[in-house]
Image (tube, rainbow, N blue to C red):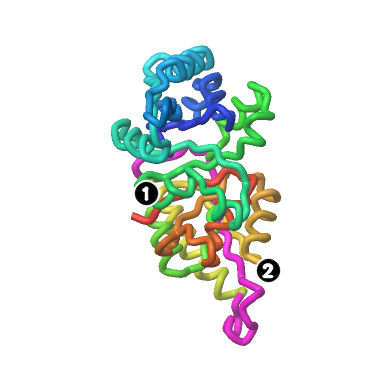
C-alpha cells in the first residue's frame, strides 16, 4: 500500500532495528526508506548548542543496523538537531514519504496530558498516514521475528466502520490509497461494525443487526471493486473492546483508523474511539489524518 516510508526513531523505541530487515520491508512494497533521528540540543551556559558528536553517533548506529539493501531500493539516513516534532514534519515534507513510522508506548489520557507526546503533536500536524508501533513489542522481537512481522504488517487490515459520514470519508481515503498502490493478492481487509451497547436499545432502530450487516456489505462492495478481498463482521458490545477482540481473533496485522473529523483531536477531555485505539492498542495502528 505504501512505497515511500519515513522511519523516525529515538533509538529507545526499537524502530532503528527496521534497518536490519529492509529486504522484508521491500517485500511489503517499500521502494524508498528514510531513517530519521533527532538529537536534542545541548545547553552550554544557557546557550543552545548543536550536539555534533551525538549526530555522528546516531548516523553510525544507523549505518551499522542497515545491513542489506536490495538492488533498485533507495535507503537514506537523516539526523538533525532541535525540536523533534518540528524536524520530523520538515523531514516528512522533504522526503515526500507516503507513510510515517513512529514508536510510541501505550499511555492513558492523563499521562498524555501531563507529560506530552511527540506522536500526539504530530497527529495534529502531519498530512501523511502514520504507522504506530509499540516499542515494548518491537524491542522483544528477534531479527527473524521482526522480519516476518514487517512482511505481514499490512496483510490483514482491520477497518472499524459504523456508516457515519466520518467513517465513509475514511473509507474513500483508503480506497484512493489502494488504487494508487494496489496491495498483493493475498492481502485481506476486514470491515468491522460494532453496535454500541452503550446506546439505548430503543435508539438503535427496529433491526440494528440486519441494518448494520446490509450497510456494511454495501461498503465492502465498494472496496471489492478494487479487486481486493474483503470480509465483514458485525458485533454488539463496547466498541473499543470489540475492536481489540476482533484484532486478536482474526489475526490482524494492523488496525486502520482516522480522526473522523474531530477538531482538536487530542483534547484529552473529549471522548474518542480513535484516540483510545491510538493510546491503548497493542496492535500496530495505521492512522490517517483527516485531509
SS class, disc 2: strand
Residue 36 visible: no
Q: Position of residue 171 (x, y in %)?
A: 43, 57
Magenta span includes 180: yes
Residue displayed at 31% across by 34% down: 96
Instruction: Please give the residue where the numbered disc 1 appears in the rendered image.
Output: 125
Residue 40 falls left or right of residue 211? left
Few, some or many C-alpha atoms within 10 Å of disc 1 (few <14, some 14-19, many ≥20)? few
SS class, disc 1: helix
Instruction: Please give the residue where the numbered disc 2 appears in the rendered image.
Output: 237
Question: Hey, which quadrant is residue 6 in on the image?
Answer: top left
Q: Position of residue 76 (x, y in %)?
A: 38, 21
Q: Is residue 163 above or below residue 190?
A: below
Quadrant showing the C terminus: bottom left
Residue displayed at 42% across by 21% down: 51
Q: Position of residue 17 (x, y in %)?
A: 56, 23
- Disc tally is 2
Q: Position of residue 38 (x, y in %)?
A: 43, 29
Q: Is residue 204 above or below residue 134?
A: below
Residue displayed at 62% across by 32% down: 138
* Separation (CA) of disc 1 from disc 2: 33 Å
Residue numbers of the magenta segment: 179-208
Q: Earlier in the sequence, mark 1 or mark 2?
A: 1
Residue extending farthest to the front is: 45
Residue 233 visible: yes
Few, some or many C-alpha atoms within 10 Å of disc 2 (few <14, some 14-19, many ≥20)? some
What is the number of the mark on residue 176? none
Q: Nearer the viewer, residue 73 or 75?
A: 75
Q: Nearer the viewer, residue 278 or 238?
A: 278
Amino acid at each position: 500500500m505504501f512505497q515511500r516510508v519515513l522511519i523516525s526513531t529515538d533509538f529507545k523505541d526499537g524502530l532503528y532495528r527496521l534497518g536490519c530487515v529492509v529486504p522484508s520491508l521491500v517485500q511489503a512494497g517499500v521502494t524508498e526508506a528514510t531513517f530519521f533521528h533527532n538529537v536534542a540540543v545541548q545547553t552550554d551556559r544557557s546557550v543552545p548548542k548543536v550536539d555534533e558528536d551525538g549526530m555522528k553517533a546516531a548516523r553510525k548506529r544507523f549505518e551499522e543496523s542497515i545491513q542489506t539493501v536490495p538492488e533498485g531500493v533507495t535507503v537514506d539516513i537523516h539526523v538533525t538537531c532541535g525540536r523533534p516534532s518540528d524536524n520530523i514534519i520538515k523531514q516528512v515534507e522533504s522526503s515526500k514519504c507516503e507513510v510515517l513510522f513512529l514508536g510510541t508506548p501505550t499511555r492513558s489520557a492523563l499521562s498524555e496530558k501531563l507529560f506530552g507526546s511527540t506522536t500526539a503533536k504530530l497527529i495534529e500536524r502531519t498530512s501523511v498516514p502514520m504507522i504506530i508501533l509499540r516499542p515494548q513489542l518491537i524491542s522483544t522481537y528477534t531479527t527473524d521475528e521482526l522480519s516476518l512481522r514487517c512482511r505481514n504488517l499490512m496483510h490483514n487490515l482491520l477497518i472499524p466502520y459504523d456508516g457515519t459520514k466520518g467513517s465513509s470519508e475514511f473509507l474513500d481515503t483508503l480506497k484512493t490509497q489502494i488504487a494508487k498502490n494496489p496491495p498483493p493478492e493475498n492481502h485481506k481487509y476486514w470491515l468491522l461494525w460494532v453496535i454500541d451497547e452503550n446506546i439505548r436499545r430503543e435508539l438503535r432502530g427496529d433491526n440494528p443487526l440486519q441494518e448494520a450487516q446490509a450497510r456494511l456489505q454495501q461498503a465492502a462492495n465498494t472496496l471489492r471493486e478494487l479487486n481486493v478481498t474483503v470480509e465483514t463482521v458485525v458485533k454488539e458490545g463496547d466498541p473499543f473492546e470489540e475492536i481489540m477482540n476482533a484484532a486478536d481473533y482474526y489475526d490482524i496485522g494492523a488496525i486502520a483508523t482516522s480522526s473522523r473529523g474531530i477538531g482538536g483531536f487530542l483534547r484529552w477531555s473529549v471522548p474518542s474511539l480513535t484516540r483510545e485505539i491510538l493510546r491503548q492498542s497493542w496492535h500496530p495502528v495505521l492512522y490517517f489524518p483527516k485531509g
